[in-house]
Amino acid sequence: MRQALTFVSLNHESTPRHGKTRTHLSRARTALFAGGFIAAAALAFLLSGYQLFQATMIIAYGVALLGLNILTGYNGQISLGHGAFFALGSYLTAVLMTSFGVPFWAAVVASGAASMAVGYAFGIPAVRLEGLYLALATFALGVAVPQLLKAHFLEQWTGGVQGISLDKPEAPFGLPLSPDQWLYLCALIAAVFLFWTAINLLQGEPGRIMRAIRDHEIAAQAMGVNTSHYKALTFSVSAGYTGIGGGISALAVQFVAPDSFTMFLSISLLVGIVIGGIGTVWGAFFGAVFILFVPALAESVSKAAPWAVYGGVLIIFMFLMPSGVVGLLRRVLHWRN
């Protein structure tokens, strides 16, 4: 199978000249990545508490959008229910911290692992569905989960309609950091690790298999790919990322309630990957900025019809940037070169 898949990514990378060029590009990207991380970490000491809250929410949404983009942009599976995994990660983090005294970092990791398990369990039957049928199945998941969180038999854990309040973690070892600064830095480190993992995953053989299934599933099957297995695994990884994003969001907001995870959240996540750029890694952050700030901006413009303003902004984005923000940046860089 590996030999058969190799031709999907065949190019002239094996030539010495191209190998040197790729090495230089890799070093430049590593330096840019390191510089970006240092600049982002410095923001912890430059921004106010509320601004750090907003930055942490951008990270939370960015991680969730990356997970959805792995599923939709790289594997071709459409999901209208990823808000359910965001809710699952948020609630599990809150329950583990408040009811069992689990440290915040372990609660977020456990929430991601649980979301992966649920995503794989959902993905196994869902792989038989395609296109609109898969979208409808995930839509049903997104509708059902917020209602289940209100169920009486789960109320002792979820708090029912009242939700759960939790505290932001304090910096350990007497570090001179506020809870907002500490949470932001922890979220930033987690995001760096998750994005680095995703890049390596997508650039390796699993990523080539995902794209092969997306581009031509029958051809991938003919090359010996177990498409059902890889589609379920992709759904699992995607759900895990979204669950971790939900856990970070719960810590930042310090409150979770069923009404916070309506279908609009799932739709917003889908909008986010389109705005940032489908099939891109870094587009997740641009999409996160959009879904965090544009609704509030629309409401400030018109309190009578904020969603009309939101829809107008979305239409403008689609006309000006049909391939997303990352696609526009790529065209600009190509034009300058």
Image (spheres, helix red, strand yellow):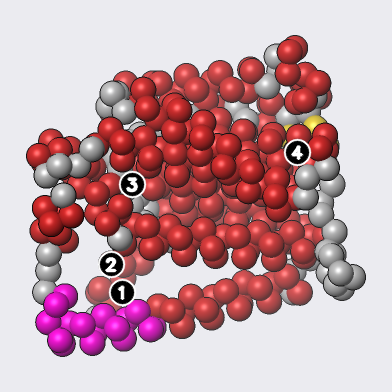
| Secondary structure of residue under mark 2 | helix
Q: Say which amino acid is labelled 1.
A: Leu
Magenta segment includes 34: no
According to the picture, the residue beneath numbered tag 4 turns out to be 96
Q: Say which amino acid is labelled 2.
A: Arg
What is the number of the mark on residue 333?
Answer: 1
Q: Position of residue 325 (x, y in %)?
A: 40, 58
Left or right: where 255 falls relative to 280: right
Mark 2 vs mark 3: which is more N-terminal?
3
Q: Nearer the viewer, mark 4 or mark 2?
A: 4
- Region of the chain picked out in magenta, as a range: 13-28
Mark 3 vs mark 1: which is more N-terminal?
3
- Identified at 12% across, 69% down, the residue is 11
- Separation of residues labelled 4 and 2 (CA atoms): 46 Å
Q: Is the Cβ of the residue at disc 2 closer than 8 Å to that at disc 1?
A: yes
Disc 3 residue crowd, few under 14, some 14–19, many 20+, Cα 10 Å: many
What is the number of the mark on residue 73?
Answer: 3
